[in-house]
Amino acid sequence: MRTSSRAIAAAGVLALAASAQVIGAQDRPESILPPGFGEPAAAPTTRATSAPLPGDPPGAVVQPLPAAPASPTATPSATPTPVDPATLALYEMPPFARRSLDRIGVAGGGIAADAFGDADGRMIEALMRRTAAPLPSRWLSILLRRTLVAAIDTPRGVDGADFAAERAWLLLRMGESVAARAVVQGVDNGDYTPKLYQVAANAWLATGDPAGMCPVVEAANTATPEPAWTFARPLCAALRGEPARARALFASARRGRSANGVDLLLAQKVMGAAADGRQAVTIEWDGVDRLTAWRFGLAAATGVAIPDALYATTGRQAYYWRALAPGVALADRVAPAEAAAGQGVLSNVALVDLYAAVAADPDAASAPSAAAQDLRIAYAGSGADARLAALRQLWGGTPTWPRLVLTARAAARQPVRGDVDAVDPLVASMLSAGLDRHAARWAAVAPAGGDAWAMIALADPDARRRLSGSDVEGYGGGEAKRRLFFAGLAGLGRLAPDDVSTSAEALGVRIGAENSWTRALDRAVTRDQPGTVALLAAIGMQTPDWRGVPPAALYRIVAALRAVGLSGEARMIAAEAIARG
């Protein structure tokens, strides 16, 4: 890794702003050769153990080699020849190992490198900054994360490192802390910009990984005066095993009065956790009125529990960071993990794995342990009836979206039967994890006009028959969901063309209305820019939940995604509207 930017924070060291693992410190490599190997035999020397040379094992005592006949030794000149920094750079990072700023991200994920085509990068960055997150749709959130983290070409008109910073900042606001860190780590240290320094600090803190700042801490302090980077220097010195230097740097930073109270105590806690830290610090949250990235990151790194009330002082994204941070205790991650799975930050498989860990923990609380037991029966119980009963127990009276995500693959194990009265939550649960063909098996027994019937009509990848206006009218989900059902069908091209305008007028859905957003979406479709379409789709869902998504916007989003080859995502978003609308 190589990096260059400025840390987001000032008041409280790193404020969470609109929201905002430990890669251990880079140790000096140890030599695998015997002490003294390769040194000239003619002039053996001893050196004090208090100043080991690079490559010596910790505490090694270097012994002189056996005496040998004297030989001429070179006398250093009075003025040594300076080494060209460019020459040194070639040894530190040879050209073949450098990464280009023209394409940054993680390979795979199904997103093409040219996802933004010839779009103006400044416009794309503006869209990212304007996107309010988290989004109401789990499936759109998943698509947006895949787009932002993918190995994509940097659009014209912007610097690659700055563009990576914008991507990572939006991911952080979405709660995708691990994905954000992956993006900033895709840029070489030497290519960091002030903006990337700023965002990268938040990404490392959001994952509970303050040590991630260490490879670039000195460069960051040169490039930016942000207090977070000033206080990162003593932390990194402590993590490198330099306690004396750490204490001196901490004292110097403290004199600057850029942080106080719990922020200083948390920094001391990290330093004390390092080798020879010699500090035992107790953290008290009394009087702390808000949660910041600095406070979250250092607390998560040292296993300090953060009161639930503090999470209420910031955006929901910090709650999702809590689910992803490995330093947070298992018991404190269960509820956030369910919420994160409902948002798309965690998958069904990841959430089930978490409950498996709960089941194996003898000290787990009773409620999560009971849920883990029910989940085991739902997956592997003896008989379909026992498995269905366990599903009902997990869902409770009214199934929540996160619990439907949790049970998705258990629901897919249920045999299709006409006497089951839980078809709606079974189908919704399967579709929450994209198990569309499993859900479509229930089409023959799903009551016509019900939610399961509507979701299957939208999500079935093998559907061939187009529905009519009378089918829309026969859907009994209520007026609001009927409009969403119509918008999804029309956007997917699954409604008879003659019935589209008629149904739109009857339901009051203005699918033909134009504005700057629809025109931008049309241009992105014409130019085959799926990345731009995904961003504009997020702009069209700037609302806390599905009840605020206009049916006309859903129609435009579904149609645009389908037009640029993202039909799977389009079908899942349309079905999600019925499950959650």
Image (tube, grey):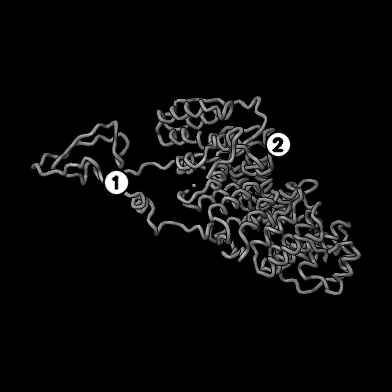
Mark nearer the N terminus (1 vs 2): 1
The secondary element bearing badge 1 is classed as loop
Q: Position of residue 290 (x, y in %)?
A: 66, 32
Identity, as a three-letter code, of the amino acid under mark 1? Pro
Place residue 146 in its image quadrant: bottom right
User: Observer-nearest residue: 74 or 547?
Assistant: 74
Q: Nearer the viewer, mark 1 or mark 2?
A: 1
For marks 1 and 2, give the CA distance.
56 Å
Identity, as a three-letter code, of the amino acid under mark 2? Ala
Residue at x 79% of width, y 74% of height = 465
Q: Could you tell me which quadrant the C terminus lies in?
A: bottom right
Residue 205 appears left or right of 250: right
Packing grade of label 1 (10 A; few <14, some 14-19, many >=20) is few
Q: Position of residue 93 (x, y in %)?
A: 39, 53
Q: In the displayed structure, would residue 507 be above or below residue 282?
A: below
Q: Position of residue 404 (x, y in %)?
A: 72, 52
Which residue corresponds to mark 1?
82
Q: Which mark is residue 259?
A: none
Residue 78 appears left or right of 303: left
Instruction: Please report contact status of discs 1 and 2: CB closer than 8 Å, yes or no.
Output: no
Packing grade of label 2 (10 A; few <14, some 14-19, many >=20) is few
Q: How many marks?
A: 2
Residue furthest toward the left? 69
The secondary element bearing badge 2 is classed as loop
Residue at x 87% of width, y 70% of height = 501
User: Observer-nearest residue: 59 or 384?
Assistant: 59
Which residue corresponds to mark 2?
312
Residue 43 appears left or right of 500: left
Residue 28 appears left or right of 19: left
Q: Is residue 546 visible?
A: yes
